[in-house]
Image (cartoon, rainbow, N blue to C red):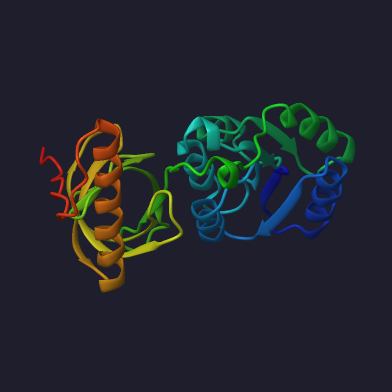
C-alpha cells in the first residue's frame, strides 16, 4: 500500500509546497483546515504522516490524538512552527519533526526524507485483523477530546484519553473496532483516573448502533469460543460490565 499524509493547514503557499514535496516521495495527501476535521479524518482512516500547523487552534489536541494510536497505526508527526509558537509544547504533544515557517522547500524535503523511514503503509486490506478505534468526547463547548477505545461491550466502553476526564454525561461517537459501523449516542463517565483512563456506560444510543453492538459482541464471543475449542452456541453473549471505581 502507498504512504499517505494528512495536512492540517490554512496557508495556501505552504500547502502548495507541502503537496509538491509529498508528490516527490510518491506520498498521497489529504488536507483539512480545522482540528475537528482532522480528528474526524484520523478516527475514520489511516495516515502514514500527519503535518500540523501549530498556529491553528486545537493543533496540540490533534497531535495527541494521533499519538494515542497503537504503534503499528501511529503516524509520523511533523509540526509547522511559527516565530511565536511554543516549540516545547509541540514536542510535548508528540511531534516527531519540526518544520519552521515560512516553509523552505529544502527543509521540507530533508524532513520528509528523514521521516519517511518511520512511516508505515495501511495494510488493513491484506491483514484483515481488528484495529483500535477512536472516540470523540465533547464536554460543554470545548473542542472534542479524543480517546483510544480499549474495550467495548453492549453496556459501554473503556477508553484511554490524553487527559483526565470529568465524571459527567457526554455525547459519544466512534467507529466499532474492526468495522466501518459508526456508533452514536451518549454515555456517562462512571469512573476515571488521573492517567486518562475511563469507563463510560451507554445512557442512550441509536437503535442501529445498538443492533451493530449486539452483533459485534456476539460475533466476537463466537470467535473466542472457537479459539478455545469449545462448541459454538448461538445464545446471546453475556454483557461485560465495566468496573465502577
Q: In this view, does 13 lie to the left or right of 91?
A: right
Q: In which quarter of the image is residue 87?
A: top right
| Left or right: 173 in relation to 68 | left
Q: How many marks?
A: 0
Residue lying furthest left in this view? 244
Residue 144 placement (x, y as % from top left):
40, 56
**Residue 170 occupies quadrant:** bottom left
Residue 212, image x, y percentages: 31, 63
Residue 13 location in percent, x, y? Answer: 83, 56
The residue at the point 22 percent across, 45 percent down is 232
Q: Which of 90 and 30 is in front in this view?
A: 30
Counting from the top left corner in percent of width and height, residue 53 is at 66, 48
Quadrant of the snapshot with the C terminus: top left
Q: Judge from the rendering whether residue 11 lies leftward or rightward of residue 48; answer left or right.
A: right
Residue at screen point 24% across, 52% down = 218
Horizontal arrangement in the rendering, residue 137 relative to residue 239 (left or right): right
- The answer to which of 17 and 129 lies nearer the viewer is 129
Quadrant assignment, res 96: top right
Which residue is at 58% across, 35% downward?
Answer: 90
**Does residue 127 lie above or below 37 as drawn?**
above
The residue at the far front in this view is 231
- At 38% from the left edge and 57% from the top edge, which residue is drawn? 174
Give the quarter of the figure containing the N terminus.
top right
Amino acid at each position: 500500500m502507498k504512504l499517505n499524509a494528512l495536512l492540517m493547514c490554512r496557508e495556501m503557499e505552504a500547502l502548495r509546497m507541502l503537496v509538491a514535496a509529498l508528490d516527490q516521495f510518491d506520498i498521497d495527501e489529504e488536507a483539512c483546515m480545522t482540528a475537528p476535521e482532522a480528528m474526524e479524518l484520523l478516527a475514520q482512516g489511516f495516515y502514514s504522516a500527519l503535518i500540523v500547523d501549530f498556529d491553528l487552534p486545537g493543533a496540540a489536541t490533534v497531535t495527541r490524538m494521533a499519538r494515542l494510536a497503537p504503534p503499528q497505526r501511529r503516524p509520523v508527526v511533523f509540526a509547522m512552527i511559527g516565530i511565536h509558537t511554543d516549540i516545547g509544547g509541540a514536542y510535548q504533544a508528540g511531534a516527531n519533526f519540526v518544520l519552521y515557517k515560512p516553509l523552505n522547500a529544502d527543509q521540507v524535503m530533508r524532513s520528509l526524507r528523514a521521516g519517511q523511514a518511520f512511516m508505515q503503509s495501511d495494510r488493513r486490506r491484506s491483514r484483515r485483523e481488528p484495529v483500535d478505534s477512536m472516540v470523540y468526547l465533547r464536554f460543554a463547548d470545548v473542542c472534542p477530546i479524543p480517546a483510544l477505545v480499549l474495550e467495548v461491550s453492549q453496556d459501554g466502553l473503556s477508553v484511554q484519553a490524553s487527559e483526565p476526564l470529568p465524571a459527567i454525561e457526554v455525547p459519544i461517537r466512534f467507529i466499532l473496532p474492526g468495522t466501518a459501523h459508526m456508533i452514536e449516542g451518549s454515555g456517562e463517565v462512571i469512573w476515571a483516573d488521573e492517567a486518562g483512563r475511563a469507563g463510560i456506560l451507554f445512557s442512550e444510543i441509536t437503535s442501529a448502533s445498538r443492533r451493530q453492538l449486539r452483533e459485534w459482541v456476539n460475533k466476537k464471543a463466537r470467535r473466542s469460543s472457537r479459539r478455545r475449542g469449545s462448541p459454538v452456541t448461538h445464545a446471546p453473549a453475556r454483557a461485560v460490565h465495566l468496573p465502577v471505581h
